[in-house]
Amino acid sequence: TEALTEAERMKVASEVAESVTEKLTSRFEGEVAAYKQLFEDEKRAAEENARRYDEELTSLRTRTEGSDAVARDLPMLQQQNESLTLSLRTERQRLGEIQQLLEESRDEVNELRQGESAITG
């Protein structure tokens, strides 16, 4: 009977060991699946961040290139502005001269009309 008891003990120990192994395997498989999911989520988040950072970098480069172009063109644009301002002053001066000539011509026309009226009376 002791041999039987020993066989029964071995059988029970084997069943317990098998049950514990199954439970541990199941638990570890669940943890591994959870870690895999966490890894995938983190990987997606990192890829999204990398994409956004790349877009921002591209945007910054574009803005920097635009600023560089403005800085390069600024002296030329300032010179053009000064030239146009001078041309505008010249044109205003000529307009003033033309207006003065027009007023003088009106005065002459009025004088001629008065003279004509005096003659034709």
Image (cartoon, grey):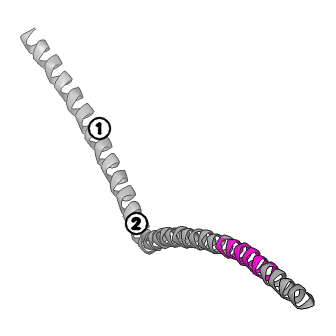
Neighbourhood count class around disc 2 (C-alpha, 10 Å): few under 14, some 14–19, many 20 upward: few
Residue drawn 25% across and 41% down? 98
Quadrant (top left, top right, bottom left, bottom right) of the C terminus: top left
40 left or right of 102 in image: right
Task: Give the labeled residue for mark 2.
Answer: 77
Gap between marks 2 and 1 measured at Cα: 34 Å
Q: Which residues are magenta?
A: 16-33
Viewer-proximal residue, 96 or 83? 83
Task: Give the labeled residue for mark 1.
Answer: 100
| Residue 44: quarter of image | bottom right
Q: Nearer the viewer, mark 2 or mark 1?
A: 2
- Please say whether residue 21 is one of the residues in the magenta stretch: yes
Question: How far from the left and from the top, in percent, is residue 108?
Answer: 19, 29
83 left or right of 62 in image: left
Instruction: Decide whether the magenta segment is chiefly helix, strand or loop.
Output: helix
- Please say whether residue 113 is one of the residues in the magenta stretch: no
Residue at the outermost left position: 120
Disc 2 is placed on an element classified as helix
107 left or right of 36 in image: left
- Mark 2 vs 1: CB contact within 8 A: no
Residue drawn 43% across and 72% down? 69
Residue at the outermost front position: 1
| Residue 38: quarter of image | bottom right
Q: Give amino acid for label 1.
A: Gln
Viewer-proximal residue, 35 or 105? 35
| Rendered view: 107 above or below 115 | below
Residue at the outermost bottom position: 3
